[in-house]
Image: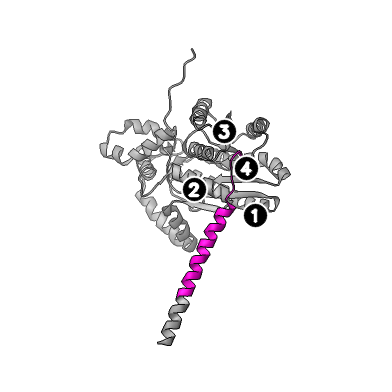
Amino acid sequence: MARRQNRHRHRTALFAAVGLGLVGFKLLQRWRQANLSGQVVLITGGSRGLGLALARAFAREGCRLVLCARDEQELDWAREDIAKQGAAVLPIVCDVADREQVDHAVEEATHHFGRVDILVNNAGQIQVGPMPTATVQDFEDALGVMFWGALYPTLAVLPQMRARRSGRIVNITSIGGKVSIPHLLPYTCAKFAAVGLSEGLRAELGREGISVTTIVPGLMRTGSHLNAVFRGQPEQEFTWFSLGASLPLVSMDAERAAQQIVRATQRGEAERILSLPANLLERFHGLFPGTTSNVLRVVNRLLPPSTGTATTGRIRGEEIQQRQRSGLFNVLTSQGNWAAKRFHQYPRPTRREP
């Protein structure tokens, strides 16, 4: 009887210690949570999708914003959107795959606001289709935007961050940078490179007072399926991808994702994986990489087979959606399409000069 009571007391003490440890860890995280009010945040790919959601979230924290994207009109719409929150916004037309344009953008942002405190490397593009239909140019384009497009801005802001011995760099990667997903090979290659860059930067820059955070999203409801490009059997590729990017149990709300990214930035976290499916997949792959690869071989058999070659044309998701006549499909993808409206993924008519 006495032994049972002792074991019970020991278990109770252990659970209490674990509970107090978790509470203490959460309190420490909150204590370390930085106040971002007044800080200058440069977001690449900031005119639509997750970039726009991030701009809104950082604006709510009182940040001043620099939004970079290739389309001037989309940047104007984003500036108007963010300005409604009372935030100072500087839109800059910039192709992140072009180092000269990136250097100029950072110089302009620094001249306008005096500094760049936080860099968010968010710009991305998605190409969907089986390997035989991918071109070398597809891989070069993906690496240009999602690897070089993260490295160039980082190199541009590092001198001033080093001089101040402070700064935050946030790299938006993907679960596709942890686990290679079939029919997304150019995308996953670029994201794997981005993950390696981000983790290496954190290891090397920490002693200089610069925090680097790797964000690993799973599927999100940003409306990105409309601006993705599809090869092979485009309609079938669009179907599976848009369902994954729309269904609530599979994909994550972009505003919720943006809030988590801001919190991870404030706390200087090393990594944050977004969404339960992405967390489960990453952990399973870490424990059983060979099994994961074999499971994905089976998944690949369920995806549309290749009927084209690398010369097959690319079709944007928005063009394919216009051809859709299935009421059921429209219902299933309704949340993804609603997200596309919220985050400016639908093309708008060109403004006419008066």
Region of the chain picked out in magenta, as a range: 12-39
Determine whether label 2 and label 3 are within 8 Å by CB: no
Determine whether label 4 and label 2 are within 8 Å by CB: no
> Which element type, helix, strand or loop, lies under badge 3?
strand
Determine whether label 3 and label 1 are within 8 Å by CB: no
Residue 305 horizontal/vertical position (percent): 37, 45
| Cα distance between the residues tagged 1 and 2 | 22 Å
Q: Which amino acid does label 4 sit on?
A: Leu
- Which scheme is used to colour this image of the protein? one colour
Instruction: Evaluate whether residue 278 shows in this view.
Output: yes
The vertical placement of 176 against 284, above or below, is above
> Which element type, helix, strand or loop, lies under badge 1?
helix
Residue 314 horizontal/vertical position (percent): 44, 34
Residue at the disc numbered 4: 151
- Whichever of callouts 3 and 4 sits on the residue coming sooner in the sequence is 3
Residue at the image point whose x is 71% and y is 44% from the top: 164
Residue at the disc numbered 3: 68
Residue 203, numbered circle: 1
> Which element type, helix, strand or loop, lies under badge 2?
helix
| Cα distance between the residues tagged 3 and 1 | 27 Å
| Cα distance between the residues tagged 1 and 4 | 16 Å
- Whichever of callouts 1 and 4 sits on the residue coming sooner in the sequence is 4
- Closer mark to the observer between disc 2 and disc 3: 2
Let me know if residue 158 is in the magenta part. no
Determine whether label 1 and label 4 are within 8 Å by CB: no
- Please, what is the dominant secondary structure of the magenta stretch? helix
Residue 260, numbered circle: 2
The front one of 31 and 99 is 31
Residue 202 horizontal/vertical position (percent): 63, 52
Q: What residue type is labelled 2?
A: Gln
